Amino acid sequence: MALRRPLLMGNWKMNKTVAETRAFAEALARETSALDASADYAVCPPFTALSLAKVVFPTRVAVGAQNVHEAASGAFTGEIAAAMLKELGVTYVLIGHSERRQYFHETDAACGRKVAAVQAAGMIPVLCVGENEAERDAGETEAVVERQTEAGLAEAAEGSAIVIAYEPVWAIGTGKTPTPADAEAVIAHIRAVVERVKSVDFAASVRILYGGSVKPENIRSFTDQPNIDGALVGGASLQPESFVAMAVAMTGGEVE
């Protein structure tokens, strides 16, 4: 992990208005000194708050988007193209979050095309992979994340940055979590898949995050693992105090 900068990323999902985003930013600005410069930080607000977030978030906190369409433009009502996000100053784009796969039927192949579109626009895709409870119980965890990773990287440019987030679906918002050792084992497998389909150097440079019921009290137990380079956090990222506490814990400080 020493060669890969830790990354803490908050996914707000369908939460916070523009006014609430501003209030979050103002509170976070008062705590910016607690965000250690050894790590990277990002928050993914709803589309409606992206342009404001770029202006009001502390400069140390990058802006991410929660989704993107694979096409550059066209008759896709309600969708957002990569160039539109780039124009707003977006740095990261989530791709294939389990909720997008489950509720909006996004396929592995579509996720691969989205990865390529985001990279081509000069942003960093965050490819989300993970098994559901039935797949875990059937012993299919490694097969599922391998399939999703291979498809997600199928059109990825090796010279462009990408982040992968392992989020076991059964742990998202449930309070359940794998043990840090179990999460490390799956993420080590994902890194091995990246090495096989791309290269040793590419696999060594890719940051792989853990996500699923992460909070200030447990984040360090995950990010201390050698292959886990940070966290993708949902509910615990909605409050600035919690986001800062996770940042402090992840970078080795004491959570008050």
Image (cartoon, rainbow, N blue to C red):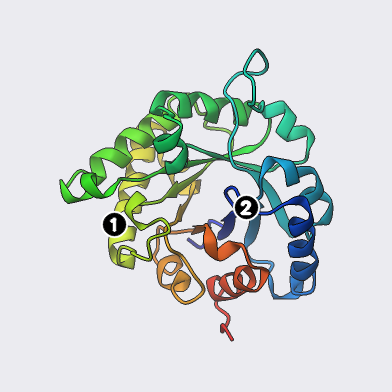
Q: Is residue 157 visible?
A: no
Mark 1: give few (<14), some (14-19) or many (20+) Cα within 10 Å: some
Looking at numbered disc 2 in the image, what kind of residue is underneath it? Asn
Image location of residue 197, percent across then percent down? 37, 31
Image location of residue 191, percent across then percent down? 37, 46
Residue that appears at 57% across and 23% down = 70
Residue that appears at 36% across and 57% down = 171
Q: In this rendering, would 148 be left or right of 74?
A: left
Q: Is residue 233 above or below residue 251?
A: above
Mark 2: give few (<14), some (14-19) or many (20+) Cα within 10 Å: few
Earlier-in-chain disc, 1 versus 2: 2
| Cα distance between the residues tagged 1 and 2 | 32 Å
Q: Which mark is residue 185?
A: 1
Q: Is residue 77 visible?
A: yes
Image location of residue 236, percent across then percent down? 54, 65
Q: Secondary structure at mark 1?
A: helix
Quarter of the rendering occupied by the C terminus: bottom right
Q: In this rendering, would 94 be left or right of 176?
A: right
Read off the residue under disc 2: 15
Looking at numbered disc 1 in the image, what kind of residue is underneath it? Ala
Quarter where residue 239 is shown: bottom right
Quarter where residue 99 is shown: top left
Image location of residue 66, percent across then percent down? 59, 42
Residue that appears at 50% across and 47% down = 205
Marks 2 and 1: in contact by CB < 8 Å?
no
Q: Nearer the viewer, residue 77 or 87?
A: 77
Q: Secondary structure at mark 2?
A: loop
